[in-house]
Amino acid sequence: MQKKATEVKFWSPLRIVATIIVLALLALFGLSSCNSNDPPPRSTAARPTARVNAGLNSLPRLVLDAENRAAAGAQPIKLSNYSGKVLLVNLWATWCGPCRMETPELVKLHKEFQSRGVEMIGLSTEDPEASAQSVSEFVREYEVDYQVGWATREVAQTLMQGHTSIPQSFIIARDGRIVRRFIGFNPSTTPPQLKQALEEALVEKG
């Protein structure tokens, strides 16, 4: 009887609620990336933390004449228009939880670095016809003030290099070199790492 009383006391309602909260937080922060090949709204927990790929020699040079569909049926986004500028390209999807967590941080970075000549482009990996409304709603909901469109299959494959997890962010130097690659999103480490990468790209001479 004494043992049973101890067990009941240990698993008090307060402890149960606290345990549920902790498990929920672990699930939230553990979900740092989704698979771009997954159909919405399904997502998968691929990595416990975001990864930074600094192996510059293994990263492709950005093709500056690649084109992507513009968000509102406007003119295609020509990456050649950004030649000579530091550029952040983000691959994402509206149904991806970590992408939703990352977007407000990207908006903050854009506001901070835009006046210094940094440009940002968000390219959805979704089907442009099927996701037109959801992308427009996403842009309004998160008050995205940078260029948004859809990545063509060729551009997405070139950038991802076989790693289909999203979000992915690429910091591109003025000469078109991809100098830093981020896979997934960690709310504690990714924002300051993105900021540092932009600072380093700005001081490089194009």
Image (cartoon, grey):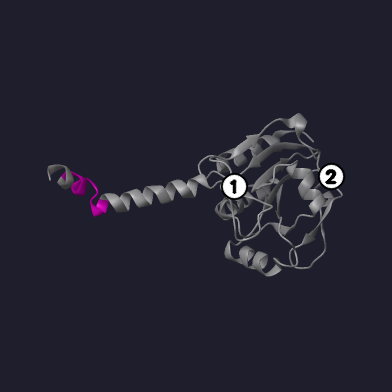
Which element is circle 2 on? loop
Instruction: Name which residue lies at 67% across and 50% down.
Output: 114
Which element is circle 1 on? loop
**Magenta segment boundaries in residue numbering:** 6-14
Quadrant in which the C terminus is drawn: top right
The residue under label 2 is which amino acid type? Val
Q: Name the residue under label 1.
A: 33
Residue 85 shows in the view: no
Quadrant in which the N terminus is drawn: top left
Residue 95, quarter of picture: bottom right
| Magenta segment includes 73 | no
Residue 205, quarter of picture: top right
- Answer left or right for 162 relative to 106: right
* Viewer-side residue, 25 vs 177: 25
Ranked by sequence position, the earlier of labels 2 and 1 is 1
Instruction: Name which residue lies at 79% across and 37% down.
Output: 60
Crowd class of label 2 (few under 14; some 14 to 19; many from 20; radius 10 Å): some
From the top left corner, tell me how far across and down residue 163 is, in percent.
Answer: 70, 42
Residue 136 shows in the view: yes
**CA–CA distance between discs 2 and 1?**
25 Å
- Answer left or right for 160 relative to 194: right
From the top left corner, tell me how far across and down residue 177 is, in percent.
Answer: 78, 37
- Outermost residue on the bottom side: it is 133
| Magenta segment includes 13 | yes
Residue 55, quarter of picture: top right
- Answer left or right for 198 relative to 128: left
Q: Which mark is in front, 2 or 1? A: 1
Q: Name the residue under label 2.
A: 63
The residue under label 1 is which amino acid type? Ser
